[in-house]
Image (spheres, grey):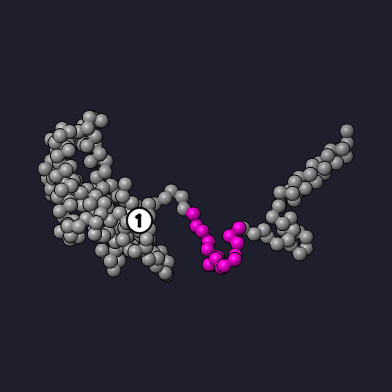
């Protein structure tokens, strides 16, 4: 339920406590589940730049695989909602519901201690920046555009990558007394199509009627 958004524009997430806690918990959880089974060195090796990136950031290419499916498999297996993963069998804790639950709680406790070491023991005072300090550290979730032209685009706060994007043109500030309703185009001075005053449908219907009349006339003039 925690959102990565800064609606007050103070430079920090409104749900900073939850975001910081969950991020630290996830890192701890992955290691606590897989280090004993795969070996810590193997888990670290798997976290290559294009593989199971544990600290995947929402860069221009979106999130990489941060062990989401792997953790889901073993937790659902402990819950009895899915079969244990095939192939190299891994599990959450000892594979039982009680064992998995204990591992989750222990990992959360360790994660909170890790964050408290830097943010303090007052959870309400924890702050997660929306932009990286000095724009050079991987400690935040900012989006960094790829510069392909002469002018670079600065990083901006995290936005979930959409399938479709809409560009909106802002013509200028809204002055007092100015209506926000769209205005109709002014009639053309020469009485052309624009003279329909925003109702070009009438002009189109007129063209269709003329075309139909012309077709009828041509058919009547055709030799029988």
Residue 135 occupies quadrant? bottom left
Q: Reply yes or no: does residue 177 show up in magenta.
A: yes
Q: Residue at x 83, y 39 (%)?
A: 216
Q: Main secondary structure of the magenta part?
A: loop
Say which of 204 and 132 sits in front: 132
In x, y percent, where is residue 54?
23, 50
Q: Residue at x 75, y 46 (%)?
A: 205
In x, y percent, where is residue 162?
42, 50
Say which of 150 and 102 sits in front: 102
Residue 59 vs 109, above or below: the answer is below
Left or right of residue 104: residue 216: right
Left or right of residue 26: residue 94: left
- Count of labels in the image: 1
Would residue 161 be visible to someone looking at this image? yes
Q: Residue at x 82, y 42 (%)?
A: 213
Left or right of residue 135: residue 218: right
In x, y percent, where is residue 16?
28, 56
Would residue 31 be visible to someone looking at this image? no
Q: Which element type, helix, strand or loop, lies under badge 1?
A: loop
Disc 1 designates what residue?
5
Residue 189 vs 28, above or below: the answer is below
Q: Residue at x 78, y 60 (%)?
A: 191
In x, y percent, where is residue 74?
21, 36
Left or right of residue 223: residue 96: left
Residue 132 vs 38, above or below: the answer is below
Residue 65 vs 126, above or below: the answer is above
Q: Quadrant of the C terminus?
A: top right
Q: Reply yes or no: does residue 54 show up in magenta.
A: no
Residue 140 occupies quadrant? bottom left
Q: Which residues are magenta?
A: 166-181
Crowding near pointer 1: few (<14 within 10 Å), some, many (20+)? some
């Amino acid at each position: 339920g925690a959102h990565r958004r800064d609606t007050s524009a103070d430079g920090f997430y409104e749900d900073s406590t939850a975001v910081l806690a969950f991020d630290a918990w996830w890192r701890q959880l992955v290691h606590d589940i897989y280090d004993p089974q795969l070996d810590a060195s193997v888990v670290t090796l798997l976290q290559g730049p294009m593989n199971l990136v544990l600290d995947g950031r929402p860069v221009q290419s979106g999130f990489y695989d941060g062990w989401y499916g792997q953790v889901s498999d073993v937790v659902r297996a402990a819950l009895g909602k899915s079969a244990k993963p095939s192939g190299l069998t891994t599990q959450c804790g000892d594979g039982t519901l009680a064992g998995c639950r204990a591992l989750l709680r222990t990992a959360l406790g360790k994660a909170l201690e890790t964050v408290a070491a830097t943010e303090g023991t007052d959870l309400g005072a924890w702050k997660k920046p929306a932009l990286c300090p000095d724009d050079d550290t991987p400690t935040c979730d900012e989006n960094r555009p790829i510069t392909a032209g002469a002018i670079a685009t600065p990083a901006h706060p995290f936005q979930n990558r959409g399938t479709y994007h809409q560009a909106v043109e802002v013509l200028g500030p809204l002055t007092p007394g100015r209506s926000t309703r769209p205005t109709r185009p002014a009639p053309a001075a020469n009485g052309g199509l624009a003279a329909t005053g925003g109702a070009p449908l009438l002009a189109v219907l007129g063209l269709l009627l003329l075309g139909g009349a012309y077709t009828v006339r041509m058919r009547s003039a055709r030799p029988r």
